[in-house]
Image: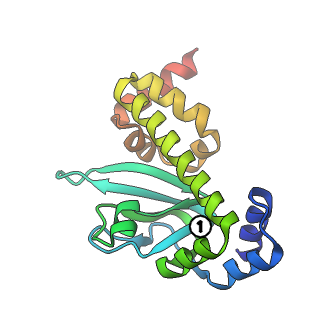
Amino acid sequence: MIAAFENYLRSQTDLSQDDINHIISLAVQRKLRRNEFLLREGDICRNKIFIASGMLRLYGLAPDGSEHILQFAPENTWTLDVESYDREIPAHTNIVAVEPSEVLLWPKADFTKLVDDMPQLKNFSQQLISRNIYNSRQRLLTTLGGTPEQKYEDFVRNSPGLLPRLPLWMIASYLGISLKTLTRIRHAQLQR
């Protein structure tokens, strides 16, 4: 788990080995079973989360109990409930392991100090935030204006590695379409 994170930082940043070691020294390692919660709605998100292996999903619940998946976070990505983390208020979302996963966690105070002490880490964090905002905006535009077929094609194009790892109901939830519609779209593609 540590080696995966170290390799990730080396490939994505120009941080020194001493800085990488310091970042790692403050990380809390955690292994999650499939369907194990890392954050439950109503709890406060107190950690930055790096996924070293496996995959997490971040979702909210509708009044009828159905899931609205906001994000899949596979290995070498970060996740958290941003509003809960930043404002220290109860989360409106859940974070759950889609498959057995290994994650690294940094408590907010530790991560804030790391960013304050390491300009390169601060710059890298800002780049990740900007990329996330851009991707979220693109997804929102597709979700609001795209047909179910366009939503699925966009998902396949942008996340091909996730398809074989996810049950269809999760993909349908992420796309905001019914399982029946997703099944129809996939069947039509197979007929071509």
Give the left or right position of residue 112, taking residue 88 as reference: right
Instruction: Identify the residue at horizontal 49%, vertical 81% (top origin).
Output: 109
x, y percentage for residue 51?
60, 65
- Give the position of the N terminus as an image quadrant: bottom right
Count of marks, rendered view: 1
Q: Is residue 87 above or below residue 135?
A: below
Residue 156 location, x and y as percent?
57, 33
Task: Choose top left, top right, bottom left or bottom right for residue 182.
Answer: top left
**In-front residue for pair 148/168:** 148
> Which residue lies at the image location 59% right of the left edge and 46% below the top edge?
162
SS type, badge 1: strand
Query: Can you identify the residue that label 1 sits on?
Result: 50
Residue type (three-letter) at the residue carrying disc 1: Phe
Q: Residue at x 48, y 30 (%)?
A: 152
Toward the top, the furthest residue is: 192
Q: Position of residue 124 (x, y in %)?
A: 65, 58
